[in-house]
Amino acid sequence: MLALKQALSLNTLKKTSGGAPWEPTDETSCEVWWENKEGISLYGTPGDTDRVYGWVGLKYGGGGHLLMPHNAAESPTYDAATGALTFDPSEDAHLSLPSTQISLTGEFTIGMRLHVAAAGGIIIGDNTTAGEFVKLFSNSILRVKIDNTLGDLELDSGTWFSDSYLVITRDSSNVLNLWWNGVEQGDTTTISGTADIDTLGVRKTDLNPYDGSISEVQIFSSTSATLTANVNARLASL
């Protein structure tokens, strides 16, 4: 009965007041939504027909952020069937914001759909400012570094190696929490400061490249139980 109530609750949360399915851009705090299977452009040149040229993300109120590779050789590859962007660490594959940066000074929520092939890489961070990243430090530990201060979040059990989704939140007391596949983990850490983000797949400068795929990213400058539930439900549906 409890599982049924939880499922019904998530379904309810995924509706707006007008009855439409919830989308990240419904939230005034939505900084960017790099949506699964949307906003992707490819190089389209011989030998690079699946190489990502750009990934446009939307934000609340219009506009958005364009992620781009340094060049085709360092670009992730794209699977149109699943919407997954695969990052090859041997190529230092990553995508960056060419001239802008997302800076989260207080509360935040970050959600990602991904498939991890190996630990040790950066899933999201900053390639302009040092000491800013979210890293798969080991098979079960997520390392977050903000303003050069680090904290670790460890899974209650298991490892990252599956087709999965994660949500990281920071509340008004600077406490970070982790949800893995919709389940809140017991470990927390506290880090204040401004979290700067302009890159998927590496940190400054092109260090610790990610090994795996990413299918969707959502970033908000707020956190709440309702928002966390909606992000988890959206990512679970992909």
Image: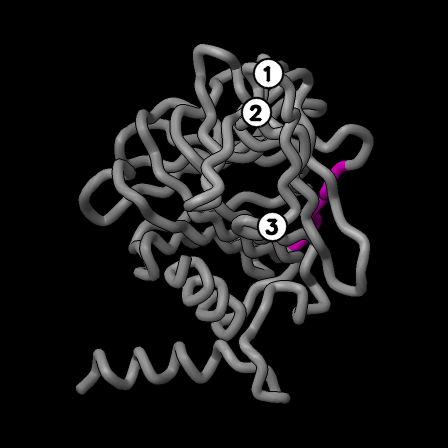
Q: Amino acid at mark 2?
A: Thr
Q: Is residue 195 left or right of residue 87?
A: right
Could you tell me if residue 126 is visible in this image? Answer: no
Q: Is residue 136 left or right of residue 54?
A: left
Q: CA distance from mark 1 to mark 3?
A: 23 Å
Could you tell me if residue 12 is visible in this image? Answer: yes
Residue 173 lies, in percent from the top left, at: 56, 58
Q: Which residue is mark 1?
A: 46
Residue 49 tag number: 2
Contact check, label 1 and label 2, Cβ < 8 Å: yes
Quadrant in the rendering for residue 11: bottom left
Q: CA distance from mark 3 to mark 2?
A: 17 Å
As helix, strand or loop, the secondary structure at mark 2 comes to loop
Q: Which residue is mark 3?
A: 38
Marks counted in the figure total 3
Residue 108 lies, in percent from the top left, at: 60, 55
Above or below — where is 180 with respect to 72? Answer: below
Contact check, label 3 and label 2, Cβ < 8 Å: no
Quadrant in the rendering for residue 75: top right
Above or below — where is 28 with respect to 54? Answer: below
